[in-house]
Image (cartoon, rainbow, N blue to C red):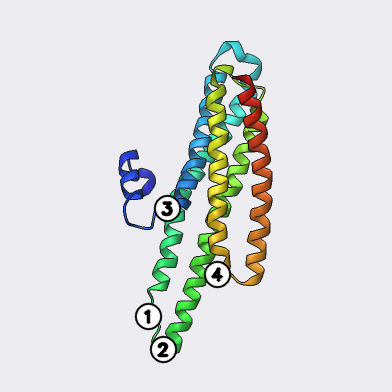
């Protein structure tokens, strides 16, 4: 599994000629990094007596950030698995009409999965940014830059996952295409606004 590889091993396979893992898995990884950083900020606040008034919210947000990290980490492998579904489907035989039909259905199923996974990454990235918004005035100020990098990682995950949604939706039926495009655009707009607002505020503090 990709999530069990060392950083060096992951980068080695990422930089190889293999098409997967690719941008989708990296987007999920960015989101996981954002959640991990947010968790760190919470822990460094809740363990510091100076910020006792913020301990409760940091424990709450920190616990949710840890769960978010786990979910996004799982999506690193889910994205590659979905890509492989599509790739394997295109390799199916297409000599007879029945084989053609089975191949077409397999491609559609794989494409749907390859669209659902990055949309989930987008959803979780916006959740991460919403958690960060709750924390903006309630954490150890020595972690300002870490908090800022967390938001940037969530934004990278959001935008990267959106590109992976967009590249797959042409292969979907009209109704599904409209659904994923509408949902993706809404998540992108909301998350981008949140990330920009948080970044501006943090940058102004430094």
Question: Disc 4 marks which residue?
Answer: 171
- Do callouts 1 and 2 mark residues in contact (Cβ within 8 Å)? yes
Question: Disc 3 marks which residue?
Answer: 22
Whichever of callouts 1 and 4 sits on the residue coming sooner in the sequence is 1
Question: Disc 1 marks which residue?
Answer: 93
Most foreground residue, 150 or 196: 196
Distance of label 1 from label 4 (alpha carbons): 19 Å
Distance of label 3 from label 2 (alpha carbons): 33 Å
Q: Residue at x 57, y 52 (%)?
A: 162
Whichever of callouts 4 and 3 sits on the residue coming sooner in the sequence is 3
Whichever of callouts 3 and 1 sits on the residue coming sooner in the sequence is 3
Distance of label 2 from label 4 (alpha carbons): 22 Å
Q: Which mark is residue 49?
A: none
Kindly state the secondary structure of the residue where label 3 is placed. Answer: loop
Question: Disc 2 marks which residue?
Answer: 96
Expressed as whole percent of the image width and height from the top left, the position of residue 92 reads: 38, 76
Residue 80 drawn above or below residue 133: below
Distance of label 1 from label 2 (alpha carbons): 8 Å
Q: Residue at x 53, y 23 (%)?
A: 43
Question: What is the quadrant of the C terminus in the image?
Answer: top right
- Do callouts 3 and 1 mark residues in contact (Cβ within 8 Å)? no
Kindly state the secondary structure of the residue where label 2 is placed. Answer: loop
Whichever of callouts 3 and 2 sits on the residue coming sooner in the sequence is 3
């Amino acid at each position: 599994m990709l999530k069990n590889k060392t950083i060096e091993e992951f980068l080695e396979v990422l930089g190889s000629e293999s098409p997967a893992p690719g941008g989708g898995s990296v987007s999920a990884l960015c989101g996981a990094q954002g959640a991990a950083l947010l968790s760190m900020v919470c822990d460094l606040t809740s363990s510091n007596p100076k910020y006792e008034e913020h301990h409760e919210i940091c424990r709450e947000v920190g616990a949710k950030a840890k769960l978010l990290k786990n979910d996004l980490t799982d999506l690193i492998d889910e994205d590659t698995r979905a890509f492989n579904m599509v790739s394997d489907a295109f390799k199916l035989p297409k000599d007879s009409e029945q084989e053609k039909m089975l191949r077409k259905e397999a491609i559609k199923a794989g494409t749907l999965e390859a669209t659902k996974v990055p949309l989930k990454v987008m959803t979780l990235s916006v959740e991460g940014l919403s958690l960060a918004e709750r924390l903006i005035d309630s954490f150890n100020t020595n972690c300002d830059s870490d908090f800022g990098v967390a938001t940037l990682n969530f934004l990278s995950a959001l935008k990267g996952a959106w590109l992976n949604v967009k590249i797959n939706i042409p292969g979907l039926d009209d109704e599904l295409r409209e659904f994923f495009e509408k949902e993706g655009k809404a998540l992108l707009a909301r998350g981008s606004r949140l990330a920009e607002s948080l970044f501006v505020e943090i940058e102004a503090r430094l």
